[in-house]
């Protein structure tokens, strides 16, 4: 007969205490990250901002801070030369990469390209990227580089080696601080803020918390119309276009 190992009440209490301690420790670590603005509100007057991120890390550690958007399928048009004219020659779908990604480090070498894989930086997404469509075998690395250039040009990707400042916080802790540029192209949604502490080439701490980007005011109203009331949105767009046309005609006649 098989014996069933049953824990005593004392053992059960010990297990519960350890689980609770782990939960509380994780919560306390997450509370160490400070984000400003805590929630970004995109209004009709939004012209970009700076995202301030700081968090505590073990003393003597370097830090990497990342701002990560959702991983969704993204499209990239491939250009080619046809009859001495550059044009779009095919569509490439890229999966496994975020729509938005900013990364900064205290030591510039942490963002340098190396043969050894790192759990941050563009190299992380190159390893997870999957390509479909007009892709020739062996062109994946070149396509990924073009994808990065496009994203950086739009301000949706960015690398900032040495931009994290590490200062003493006392009691065996240091504080890592960074400031990221956020432009008007950022989309509403839930993002992740990730703080990684590195010592001697090894990850000694990693904390990740959510960061919310919302739309408010007239952009929120227009988004609601476009997604929930497309007919009304179309009527308003036509009405606005007609009004602008009439006003333009009156102004040109008056001149």
Image (cartoon, rainbow, N blue to C red):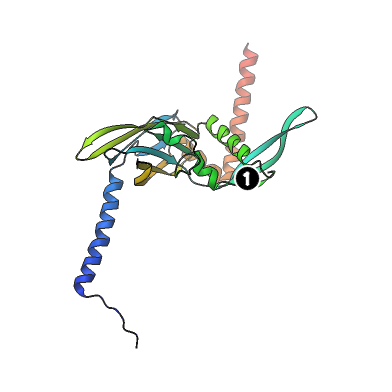
Q: Position of residue 35 (x, y in %)?
A: 33, 38
Pick the residue in front: 30 or 244.
30
Please name the residue shown 35% across and 38% down the image. Answer: 63
- Note whether residue 25 is visible: yes
> Between 75 and 244, which is closer to the camera in this rendering?
75
Decide if residue 135 is on the left or right side of residue 28. Answer: right
137 vs 236: above or below: below
Residue pictured at 34% horizontal, 85% vertical: 2
Q: Is residue 42 visible?
A: no
Q: Position of residue 137 (x, y in %)?
A: 68, 45
Q: Position of residue 9 (x, y in %)?
A: 20, 74
Residue reaching furthest to the bottom: 1
Q: Residue at x 66, y 38 (%)?
A: 77
Q: Specify the quadrant of the image occupied by residue 240.
A: top right
Q: Residue at x 51, y 47 (%)?
A: 71
- Figure quadrant of the C terminus: top right
């Amino acid at each position: 007969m098989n014996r069933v190992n049953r824990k005593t009440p004392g053992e059960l209490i010990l297990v519960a205490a350890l689980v609770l301690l782990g939960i509380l420790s994780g919560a306390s670590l997450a509370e160490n990250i400070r984000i400003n603005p805590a929630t970004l509100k995109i209004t009709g007057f939004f012209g970009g901002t700076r995202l301030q991120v700081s968090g505590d890390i073990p003393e003597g550690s370097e830090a990497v801070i990342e701002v990560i958007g959702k991983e969704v399928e993204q499209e990239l048009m491939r250009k080619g030369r046809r009859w001495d004219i550059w044009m779009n020659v095919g569509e490439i779908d890229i999966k496994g990469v975020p729509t938005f990604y900013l990364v900064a480090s205290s030591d510039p070498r942490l963002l340098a390209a190396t043969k050894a894989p790192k759990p941050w930086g563009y190299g992380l997404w190159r390893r997870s990227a999957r390509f479909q469509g007009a892709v020739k075998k062996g062109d994946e690395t070149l396509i990924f580089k073009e994808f990065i250039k496009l994203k950086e040009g739009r301000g949706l990707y960015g690398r900032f080696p040495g931009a994290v400042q590490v200062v003493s916080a006392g009691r065996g802790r240091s504080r890592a601080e960074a400031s990221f540029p956020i432009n008007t192209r950022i989309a509403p949604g839930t993002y992740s803020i990730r703080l990684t502490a590195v010592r001697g080439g090894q990850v000694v701490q990693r904390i990740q918390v959510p960061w919310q980007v919302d739309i408010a005011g007239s952009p929120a109203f227009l988004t609601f119309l476009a997604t929930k009331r497309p007919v009304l949105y179309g009527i308003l767009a036509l009405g606005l276009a007609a009004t602008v046309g009439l006003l333009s005609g009156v102004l040109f006649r008056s001149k």
